[in-house]
Image (cartoon, grey):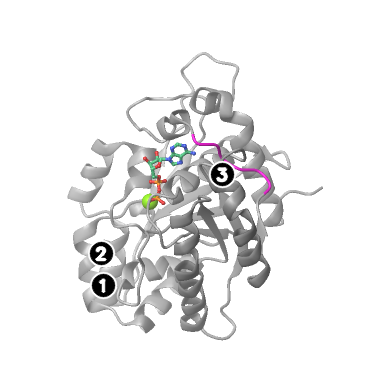
Amino acid sequence: MARSIGIYNNKGGVGKTTLSLFLSDFLSSITINKKKSKVLVMDFDPQASCANAILGIEKVSEITNDSLTLPFILNSRLDQKKGIDLSRFIFTRERDNDAKTKKTRLGNLDVMVSEPKLALNFDEKASLNDSLKLARWIASELATEYDFIFVDLPGSISKINRFSLVGAFMVDYFVVPTELNRLNINALSGTLKMLDNIREWRGYGNDYNLLGFVLNKADKRTVQYKLHKDELIHFAKIKNCKIYKNTLPPTPRLSDAADDSIGFITLSERYDNYYDNVRNLVIEITRDLGYIRN
Ligand SMILES: Nc1ncnc2c1ncn2[C@@H]1O[C@H](COP(=O)(O)OP(=O)(O)O)[C@@H](O)[C@H]1O
Ligand SMILES: [Mg+2]
């Protein structure tokens, strides 16, 4: 059964898409418990940046032109209420078996693509209850196909974003990437409030688990970091969640790792000197999902 993990922070630019990519990238490439995992990324941000990073901009525009997108599925299901073959809407980044290397290759990774026009269409047509029903439907359709489903969410979600809320309603676990500075700490109460709203809208018996905060662009030596660490500890206490010990440093290299034009073939090429940072974070999160046996 799939575990679905929502990457969310109401603030933009904190690393939601980057973290969704890194987690799905690693988990689709390495073996856990001697097994290759089946991993899906569902891009619930209408801007589709995660799908762009994985499949490349040309492939994504082809998919959009052919209307093979996530909002298309949701709109059709809303209108017709009949069966839809989801496999037509899933695209795979394939492992490059031709290149000569002994290093771990980037693995097969499935993606469902988003698109702004039909997402807005869905926002305008669907009720909150429609989002809930569709979230349950799509989660149950995919549950037996995957080990991990990553849901990349946009910032600034509100009650009217019925498309992105489908994503928020289907996840079992939330992870919140954040930076440690004044603007990010200010934005966190809004994020946590929205997570409370999501809990309320999902209703009794359909709760999620908030795993914790991932520090992105984190440099322990900076004044900002030292100044705001205690405030983050406070938020983690209130929400009974953790702050991930493994962090991601601020570096252009990690920004480039999400650049689809570079054409990486192996994990070590993509993450370079930061391979261990990303790997350790992925392992820490995967443990909390109960996936890795100690
Ligand atoms: N650890 C990092 N170091 C340097 N740049 C980063 C890092 N994480 C993310 N970025 C860059 O910051 C920008 C915002 O990241 P992104 O993942 O798109 O945020 P969000 O999805 O929350 O809006 C992107 O240009 C990305 O490449
Ligand atoms: Mg994003």
**In the image, residue 224 above or below residue 187:** above
Image quadrant containing the N terminus:
bottom right
Residue 86 visible:
yes
**In the image, residue 45 above or below residue 206:** above
At numbered mark 1, what does the secondary structure look like: helix, strand or loop? helix
The answer to which image quadrant residue 34 occupies is: top right
Residues 252 and 279: in front is: 252
State yes or no: discs 2 and 1 in contact (Cβ < 8 Å). yes
If the picture is divided into quarters, which one holds ligand 1? Answer: top left
At numbered mark 2, what does the secondary structure look like: helix, strand or loop? helix
Residue at image point 57% right, 86% down: 204
Which secondary structure class fits the magenta region best?
loop
Cα distance, mark 2 to mark 1? 6 Å
The amino acid marked with disc number 1 is Asp
Few, some or many residues within 10 Å of mark 2 (<14, 14–19, 20+): many
* Residues in magenta, as a range: 245-250
The CB of the residue at mark 3 lies under 8 Å from ligand 1: no
Q: In the picture provided, is 54 more to the left or to the right than 291?
A: left
Cα distance, mark 3 to mark 1? 41 Å
Closer to us: mark 3 or mark 1?
3
Q: How far across and how far down the image is residue 264, in percent?
A: 43, 25
The answer to which image quadrant residue 290 occupies is: bottom right
Indicate which disc, 3 or 1, sits on the residue closer to the N terminus.
Answer: 1
Judging by the rendered image, the residue that carries numbered circle 1 is 123
Few, some or many residues within 10 Å of mark 3 (<14, 14–19, 20+): few
Q: In the picture provided, is 272 more to the left or to the right than 64?
A: right
Judging by the rendered image, the residue that carries numbered circle 2 is 119
Judging by the rendered image, the residue that carries numbered circle 3 is 223
Q: Is residue 248 magenta?
A: yes
